[in-house]
Amino acid sequence: MTSYFEEISPAAPDTVPLRRVTLTLNGQQRVAEIEPRLLLAHLLRSGFKLTGTHTGCDTTNCGACTVLFDGQPVKSCTMLAVQADGHDVLTVEGLATSSELHPIQEGFKDAHGLQCGFCTPGMMLTAKALLEQNPNPTEDEVRWALSGNLCRCTGYQNIVKAVLWAADKMTKE
Amino acid sequence: MPEALDEIKIGGMGASRKRVEDNRFIRGKGNYIDDIVLPGMLHMEILRSPVAHARIRSIDTSKAWNMPGVRLVLTGEMMAARNLAWMPTLSYDTQAVLATDKVRFQGQEVACVIADDPYIAKDACEMIVVDYEPLPAIVNPQQALADGAPLIRDDKENQHDNVVYHWEVGDKEGTDRAFAQADVVSKLELHYPRSHPSPLECCGSIADFNRSTSKLTVYMTTQAPHIIRAAVALVAELPEHMIRVISPDLGGGFGNKVPVYPGYVMSILASILLESPVKWIEDRTGNLISTGFARDVYLQGEMALRKDGKILGVRMHTDADHGAFFSDAQPSKFKIGLMHSAFACYDIPAAHLTARGMYTNKAPGGVAYRCSFRVTEAMYFQERMVQEAANDLGMDQAQFRRMNFVRDDDFPHRTPFGFLTDSGQYGKCLDVGLAAVGYDDFLKQKEEARKNGRLLGIGISTMTEPLGAGNSREYDILGIKMFDSAELRVHMTGKAILRTGAKTQGQGHETTWAQIVAHELGIPAEDITVEEGDTDTAPFGMGTYASRSTPVAGAAVAMVSRKIRAKARKLAAHLLEVSEEDIDWELGRFYVRSARDRGVTIQECAMAAYSNMPDGMEPGLENNAYYDPPNLTWPFACYIATVEVDPQTGVWDVLNMVAVDDCGVRINPMIVEGQIMGGLTEAYAMANMQFITFDSEGNCIGSNFMDYLLPTAWETPGFELHEVVTPCPHHPIGAKGIGECATVGGPAAFVNAVMNAIGDKGVRNIDMPLLPDRVYEAITQKHDVSGAPPIRTDDE
């Protein structure tokens, strides 16, 4: 349970209406009292301290803030947190279990699919949604699926390899 | 006798070791600036100028002050009262922290608000009322030079025009003589458009001034934390030992995180005034319109040629647009950076370069965007000029390059502008590239395709570039010499911690530095922790940019390891009860020369350093090294692109992109290849789509990722990588820089390929980016398309 403004802003004026939001976050039910204009990315990062969701552009272009919303990739920097009420949200912190990495995470490390790491959480979540719909994608299908996520370091070639590596591993499992 | 260590197995040189830092990044457990939360932390937001050039009549902050949750509103006037309204730049100019008299570019910092919450701070910025008196805006160097142009820098005494500098280098008379002897003179004019590095993470800082200890801790997105500490100490006159700069995980840098930005300065002042931690996180628009841009240079030149293809001389002139303040982040003594590294791979007897810089009403701070200080522009001009010269002579472009290359046995070689290159196999790299792309076959295909109305083209770009500033004779930042450093502490169990003065931003230092230690000492890489970025713990270094980490800090890592090995040798002699002269070293182990099975491992030496040292020996096994390179390193690259241009639309597709890089000895081939592919993508971006331009009023077109196009996985082509290895003769492990080669050399390969495809249409040049409408215009109108792309406004 996290009450967002209680902690961050003692000076929040009484006139700000608070809304209660209940969501399933990485498999656990979480509740927050929030200002209605709060963005989902900010609730995840500042409210729930899940800082793996990054914001890179504020305009839905770069995809660093991508989370899975009822299984679909969405860009949480331009989604209101109140829209998540009653929904299921998966962030990068929910990808691995305590003992084991998700194959996509392994693939990114194995194929050198990341450098600075800032785009990586969003890339991996987008890839997860792709592989759930299409377990054996072609290179072009991977590139198309990832085209809403920007990377400035890798040139994408190794990211594509990482996703195909994961697809291969997941089909074999 | 123990089995010899396998260097690859212990993660030494040449191992494509998986990256250590990935373990946190793939779990979302990186620690970037915005992830850091300090108790009682306040939030800062900046109000920026909406206009490019205007006098400030008044600023009314009263409504902002009265908002609940607002702690402080800063204006230029308040900064001026503390002598902080202006700050020095890295290029010996001044830059406004908060505007006092005028705003000089759209996006300039005008005021800032510190509040309990970032939303409140943003709201409060909206409540600040600024009365601007508009002035005409200057948006290119030509306007800046025009008669009657408004004076942008009226704050500076003795500044009576918009010229920043005149500068020249080379041999003017010798070049004149070369042109007098020329059979053919080839000419070219280019514009390298303004671009922005745009690391995916924007800039930010958290300043935390603790009154009780007088210590200022600044978390900051900086590629050079020690420089920042020095700058704060010298500029703000705070004692250096009371300043701690911590550069956490950086979400990319590419040069954008080298300069000192006003936001950093304001967050520091605000923390001192409020005695609370103050966090500033830049938004993307702020990043794009106010922080270090790159390029924006007009280049023209000519080449004197003999009929047989020999280049006799080169003349170049550059007009650079520096924006409102000359704050180029470059450490050389040369006004236009290393522009005069142009033509370094060719044997050219004479060359002369003149350069002018101009102030304009655009964002300041030309940074080396994945580049060594204007090398990108230099190599772009070089390789476009070379192709056009080959065309003018009617020669094959590969053959023309080959006959003018510096030969393998001609090193060290003095370049046309006076640099000293030391090694390379240029012809071999070209051969590998031509073979990989299937050059002769492609030329046949191209001819066949043309008969069917299809336009195929091939573009070559070959270049050597100077990487790894400095040496300290020619390179410094505000007088601080460009060396770098490493400190290695070997614990008693043979594990170790290494700290350097560099700062990784994705290059993987935590992985590769340990590999150098493993190579030098035989300690497995996984037993070595690497730390960077905290000025309280890391040795003084100049940071990471201009591909200087491996050439300079990497060399320091090797040198400190060798110091450790020298002490370990004494310990080994003691343990083996022989004299030092009687022992030899193999990876990870000293042994008695006459009895190879009698030996001690480096780990045993480490334990002895703490438990069994000889009488009189200082305990412990640690040391540091400061490395001042004797020269820059000179990697060579050959990039060859093949494209197909659609004559109906002007759209061009990359068919193949072959990269042959010779960066000397590769420490971690996987990481080197990652750097090359990233660089090629930026090269493709520059050639194809990525530019920032301005309308006539100075409005920045490209202030967000909807207008500023970055390539995605969909349009980015695949790359085919090859290598040639010519070790650097003066680097301790034979390595050369690599991080930026592809960004520097790549653009010309793509543009040359497109020009080659449409070359028979009577078009000499299309300036980047080669947007489809520009290519289409060139094909259909049969004329050059020059300058920054025009901006279509709503009126048109």
Image: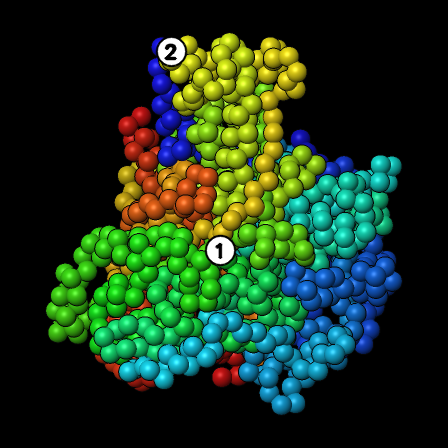
Residue that numbered label 1 is attached to: B370
Identify which residue, B258 or B198, lies in the foreground.
B258
Amino acid residing under circle 1:
Arg
Kindly state the secondary structure of the residue where label 1 is placed.
loop
Amino acid residing under circle 2:
Ala
Near mark 2 (Cα within 10 A), the count class, few <14, some 14-19 or many ≥20, is few
Q: Chain of mark 2?
A: B
B198 displayed left or right of B586: right
B377 displayed left or right of B139: left
| Numbered label attached to residue A169 | none
Residue that numbered label 2 is attached to: B595
Q: Toward which corner of the image does residue A135 lie, by quadrant?
A: top left
Residue B378 horizontal/vertical position (percent):
44, 66
| Residue at the image point whose x is 47% and y is 25% from the top | B521
Identify which residue, B607 or B54, lies in the foreground.
B607
Question: Does B361 appear above or below B89?
Answer: below
Kindly state the secondary structure of the residue where label 2 is placed.
strand
Residue B144 horizontal/vertical position (percent):
60, 81
The answer to whether mark 2 and mark 1 are in CB contact below 8 A is no
